[in-house]
Amino acid sequence: MQYTIHLFGLNHKTADVEVREAFALADGGILERALVSRESPIREALVLSTCNRVEILVSGAPEAEVASLVLSRWAGHCNRDAARLSPHIYAHAGTGAVEHVFRVASGLDSMVLGEPQILGQMKDAYRRAVGNGSTGVILNRLLHKAFSTAKKVRTATGIGASAVSISYAAVELAKRIFGETAGKKAMLIGAGEMAELAATHLLTSGISHLFVANRTFSRAKELAERFHGTAIPFENLVEHLPEADIVISSTGAPQAIIRARDIKDVLKKRRQRPMFFIDIAVPRDIDPDVNSLDNVYLYDIDDLREVVEENLAQRKEEATRAGEIVLEQVESFSHWLKALDLSPTIVDVLRYGEDIAKKELCKTLRRLGPDVSPETAKALERLALSISHKILHEPIVFLKRRSRENAGERFLDLIRRVFDLDKETVPEDAHGRGADDPACGCEDEISNKAGAPCVPTSSRN
Amino acid sequence: MTPDNLLFLAVICLYLSGTILYLLGVLWQAPLLRRASYAAAIAGFVLHSVCLGLSLREEAGTMLLRGEFYFSLLAWSLLLIFFFLWWRLRMDFLGLLASPLALILFLSSQAVGGVRQLPETLAGLFFGLHIGSLFLSISLLAMACGAGVGYLFLERKIKTKEKLSGFARALPSLSTFDRANQWAVTGGFPLYTIGLVSGFLWAKLTWQRIFSWDPKEVVAIFIWLLFAFLFHQRLFMGWRGRKTAWLAIWVFCLSIVSMLVINFFMPTHHSFAS
């Protein structure tokens, strides 16, 4: 019996924040279990829900009408009307669904092209689904393949190589200057949203201390408490500058608040240790002349935006190459899926045995030399082939009997793997969490800024 | 072909392949090639050490009178310093400088030949100290020069907000470059001083004259003054970054001039050949 893979979903391109919020699935496990219940035609199900997308991946009998079933269960689960859901939905089946899964895992479908968080979120969702027992041979294989595809895309293309958000770009530049950002001290001047975002990134990259200066001192205090930093009064800000290696300024001041001659003194006090100024205010807070001082680097919002845009353009180029890799992998997966049936598997097993028999026959004949009569050669061939057929008889009988059972494709997969009929390996870390996946529950920070609440993908089992 | 020649050829091949592999690794941005180039350089270095050790054991007396030995020794100490920096600072990009330079020095060690007669006191303690500390100091300066060029290149890119292309992206950070400079200055200046002082003491013992207005000695004094200035500014005035990078480049260029130009083209008792 053949199975078809279906995928239903909505993402940031098809649905706006309200819809995504309304149909988010905070605990996908419940829906997964409901979908694979006994009377349902769906055999395997996986739910992926992040702040930018909800995807439901199922595998079931090809003739079954899964679309309406999945959508009604999904809407019912969120206590909403299915009619509101359907205009935002995209549906893929067969290789289309496979390709979509691979593209999502590789970050090619993300709002920020090539971002890596989605892979971690997929791994979490998959781990939960495995724990729930809602995945089987087909989805397991599909997800393993998706993870290895993502890895391949990441190593073979430069899609994840460069920073594509303002604050990432700032942190990356800081690393170019200081080497390690660990142990460095940073100062926030002005406590706006952008400054906060940059501070979060700096802290995750290992900044040891944060000073916060703001015109309204209470806000500075509030922010400092959140980041375990020190609030300083706005008037005393220059006195504290010698302690700061990285300064992020974002006040609404109409004219520059830091001038080049202030910094000259500051540098003397710092014994010329380098400083990095990031001015994200408009109009600018920091005198552009500061950049001409030795050991001082100043980037304003336009400079950073330029870096980001260049990097994004680069990623788009890489995405075409990544798409080719994805297509290759889809091909290889489809091949496996097609072979995951009784008769192709039996053919493959028999051919496996015959190949060995023929190879050994060749060797033996060569060793026996030229004076072997054709009759003897024929007899030897018959012997070799019949041994291989006899040995493989029992496994094939077993396969015929068991593959008719419920979830019989398990045994097909088992036999295919025992004899290595697909000639490929599942990566070792297919179940593990990649070391480079940040623990953040959100696909990217831009969505944070857009105000989308982040739905935790899963409670880890 | 004697075993000595074979060893010599092997060292050249290893250094050459190290250099080429490194260049290709940088051009194609293939970390595997770069790793292969380190392997080649390390193997070459080990064989080179064997080479030096063997020739010293066999004919210590005559070797010390040969110019080729000193070139070979300088190439060796250059790589020694490079490996040290690579180990401590992961400054692998200096390989771009170290392995070709070592190759050139090692090759030119064969170009300068000839034994010249020097007094018996030559192989004394002061002479060894003179050569050893100066060579180590020059190797440190070479690395500081490389790091300085890297610093200036990257600093310019960051200051002018230029896009960091493939090669610039692979460079270490500014602070790493600066640390290489700091080490070269704090280590190199005392070594240079020891080298000069022991040279003068040796001259006093050998020629009964401390200073003989040899062109090389004059230049060395000038380099020492410049180096002292760099040392002072760096350690006590808190200079760092661009200015120290430039100074290190100048000091190194001058020492190269003093070593090559003066040794080969001017009358000096430091000449390698007779």
Image (cartoon, rainbow, N blue to C red):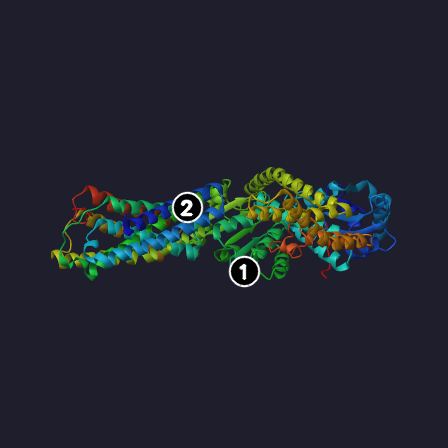
Q: Residue at x 62, y 37 (%)?
A: A320
Picture coordinates of residue A290, whole percent (x, y): 47, 46
The chain under label 2 reads B
Dot 1: what SS? Answer: loop
The chain under label 1 reads A
Residue A66, labelled with which disc?
A: none
Which residue is disc 1 drawn over?
A: A208
Which residue is disc 2 drawn over?
A: B150
**Crowdedness of circle 1 by 10 Å Cα count: few (<14), some, many (20+)?**
some
Q: Residue at x 60, y 37 (%)?
A: A317
Dot 2: what SS? Answer: helix
Near-viewer residue (A303 or B93): B93
Picture coordinates of residue B102, whole percent (x, y): 33, 48
Q: CA distance from mark 1 to mark 2?
A: 28 Å
Quadrant position of residue B61:
bottom left
* Residue A102 in view of the camera: yes
Q: Type of residue at label 1?
A: Ser
Q: In the drawing, does residue A2 fall left or right of residue B238?
A: right
Picture coordinates of residue A356, whole percent (x, y): 64, 49
Picture coordinates of residue B227, whole percent (x, y): 29, 52
Q: Type of residue at label 2?
A: Gly
Near-viewer residue (A85 or A255): A85
